Each structure stands twice: as structure tokens, then as C-alpha cells.
Amino acid sequence: MVKFGYTINYVPNVDIAMSFFEKAFEMKRRFITDENDYGELDTGETTLAFASHELGLSNFSGGYVSSTESDKPLGIEIALVTDDVSEVHQRAIHYGAVELKSPETKPWGQMVSFIRCPSGILIELCSPIQS
């Protein structure tokens, strides 16, 4: 069996990226290296992690598309589930996120919004899907 373990986002500054998630989403820091080039947040069963662009480039000699430097968000998102999408959406904007789509209720009843954090990562804020 394969288990999903990490999502690692390459960012210009690991400490700043983690601080945004701590403030905007009240996540807790689990680990950061002494070099500040890799860190993890305690987000539940799956780990949300950050690595410096320098560390990323050491893994990919041909480079990669940086979410920080791309004018458009990358075609991948982090979805964060909350009971209060509007409040969390506004808090994220307060801490530096850019609104891409304000909160709206989808036809299936789920509240969804989209923001881009200061490191360029596309984030969906959504309420739990009612089954």
C-alpha cells in the first residue's frame, strides 16, 4: 500500500511561508532545519512542507516552474477545509494573500473560495462536503 505523506512547496523563504500559514490558518510548526531551508507544519495526517528554491534547484538540475515567479497560479492547489470559509478567507487576505475568487456556494452546497498566498501557492478554502 502507498500512503500520501507530504506536499512540499518550494518557496523563496521557508520561515516566512510557514509564518503565513501559522497566522492565517492557525497551523502549528512541527519542524524547521537549522539552515531554514526545509520546514513542516502540523496539519493532521498529511504533512504540509516547504523547501527553499535553492534546495529545490539542487534536486532538479533543469529547474522547475516556480509558483512564486509565475504570473498565473500553477495548475495544482492546496485545499484547506474549514467550517467558516468567509472568516478564514478574510484572515488570509489580512496576512498577505491575494483573493482570486471570493467565497461562493457551489451547486452541491459546499462553500469555496480561492486565494494565492504570498509565496504564490494556490489555496482553495472550502467547507466540508456534505454527504
Image: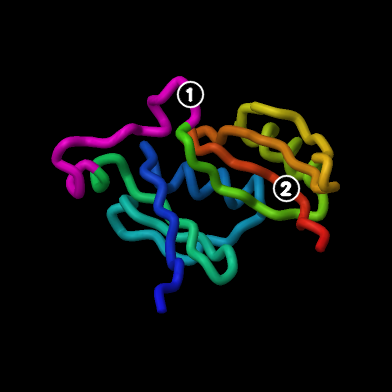
Residue at 43 percent of width and 47 percent of height = 15
Give above or below for 120 relative to 58: above
Quick one: 3 or 100, which is closer to the camera? 3
Residue designated by label 2? 126
Please tell me the numbered disc located at residue 83.
none
Which of disc 2 and disc 1 is earlier in sequence?
Answer: 1
Taking the view exactly as shown, the residue that stands out farthest to the left is 61
SS under mark 2: strand
Q: x and y percent of residue 88 in the render? A: 74, 44
Q: x and y percent of residue 86 in the render? A: 81, 40
**Type of amino acid under label 2:** Cys
Mark 2 burial class by Cα count in 10 Å: few <14, some 14-19, many 20+: many
Total numbered labels placed on residues in the image? 2
Residue designated by label 1? 72
Magenta residues?
57-73
**Type of amino acid under label 1:** Lys
Residue at 54 percent of width and 37 percent of height = 122
Q: x and y percent of residue 47 in the render? A: 48, 63
Q: Between marks 1 and 2, how big is the CA–CA gap?
A: 21 Å
